[in-house]
Amino acid sequence: MITATVKGTERLKGKDCLTLADFSSGEILSLLDLARQLKEEKFSPLLMGKSLGMIFEKPSTRTRVSFEVGMTQLGGHALYLNGHDLQLGRGETISDTAKVLSRYVDAIMIRTFGQEKVEELAEAADIPVINGLTNEFHPCQALADLLTIQEKLGDFAGKTLVYVGDGNNMTHSLMIGAAKVGMNCIVAAPAGCEPDLKITEQAQKFGEQTGAVVKVENDPFAAVEEADIVYADVWTSMGDEENEERLKLLSEYQINLPLLAHARKAPLFMHCLPAHRGEEVTAEVIDGPNSVVFDQAENRLHAQKALLAALLG
């Protein structure tokens, strides 16, 4: 059964995963189907003898553990590469790093700052490159989120995901992912914190193909009215935690019970973690009965196993 599903994703073999825009709607749905099967089987030696090089220039809990365990459960091996320990941290070019690693491992996952570094790495590498997070995108998390929503709510059509907070890398990937699978996505962000306009327009074009509505507004109370899912992320990115001006701007965008009272139904609550309770979300929401944040965290493992199995063949 697993073999049949892998054959259904053969066209993904050798591809990169830089953003979810790299995949068609059908390819994303096939990955979700494979992820569900791999979740049931747990150990599936599809990548016996394969190796994944993992470059980390930003700290990580879920990304590192899920990729390492995922490769182990697929019969392969993951190698942790701290960006400060590599020659990359001492001036070796990204291109040279990519060419060398292409001789050693079967794929590269990188968690870094600028999206341009991931793109340069992928351009020079002869093997698949996976974006484990950049300042602009977080496709692996969004793929796991789609898996979680599908498990909890079934079909994507007619469902509405409402993201409340800063228009960041998570927002960008959710807009693209939702649009690709035909799910509406509303982003409620304060003026000055909206998602990138070009990425918003790109997601809206994908939505035109699938019937999904993607829009950005400033009123969180109006945004959550039709929500099936309400999503939050931290208000400040790594290294920007002391930005008091941004925190003040986002203070009216906390996910709390008064905000959720404006929803016409009891929505699921999602958060990519780590969370700052009392900041972007209250404890009573994230620890409440409609929170699925730990299901999301688990699904990083299963979604990424599907991605690895498809890209590495």
Image: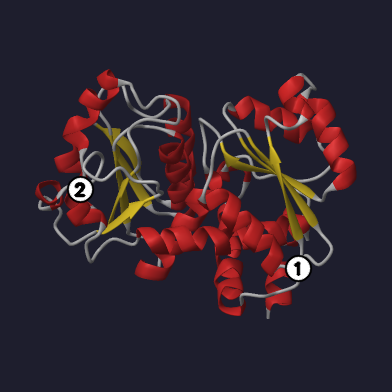
Extreme residue toward the front, this view: 85
Q: Position of residue 148 (x, y in %)?
A: 43, 63
Name the side, left or right, on which 89 lies relative to 160.
right
- Whether residue 156 appears in this view of the structure is no
Residue at x-position 21% and y-position 24%:
248
Image quarter where the N terminus lies is bottom right
Is residue 16 depicted above or below 42 in this figure?
Answer: above
Q: Disc 2 marks which residue? A: 282
Quarter holding residue 220: top left
**Among the 4 quarters of the image, the one containing residue 236:** top left
Residue at the image position 44 percent from the left and 47 percent from the top: 179
Up-down: is 136 above or below 13? above
The residue tagged with tag 1: helix, strand or loop? loop
Classify residue 263 as left or right of residue 161: left
Give the amino acid type for the residue marked by disc 2 in the picture: Thr
- Residue at the farthest right position: 103
Q: Residue 118: tell me if it is visible.
A: yes
Quadrant showing the C terminus: bottom right
Residue 65, numbered circle: none
User: What residue is shown at x 90% (from left), y 43% (from top)?
Assistant: 103
Q: Nearer the viewer, residue 133 or 12?
A: 133
Q: CA distance from mark 2 to mark 1?
A: 40 Å
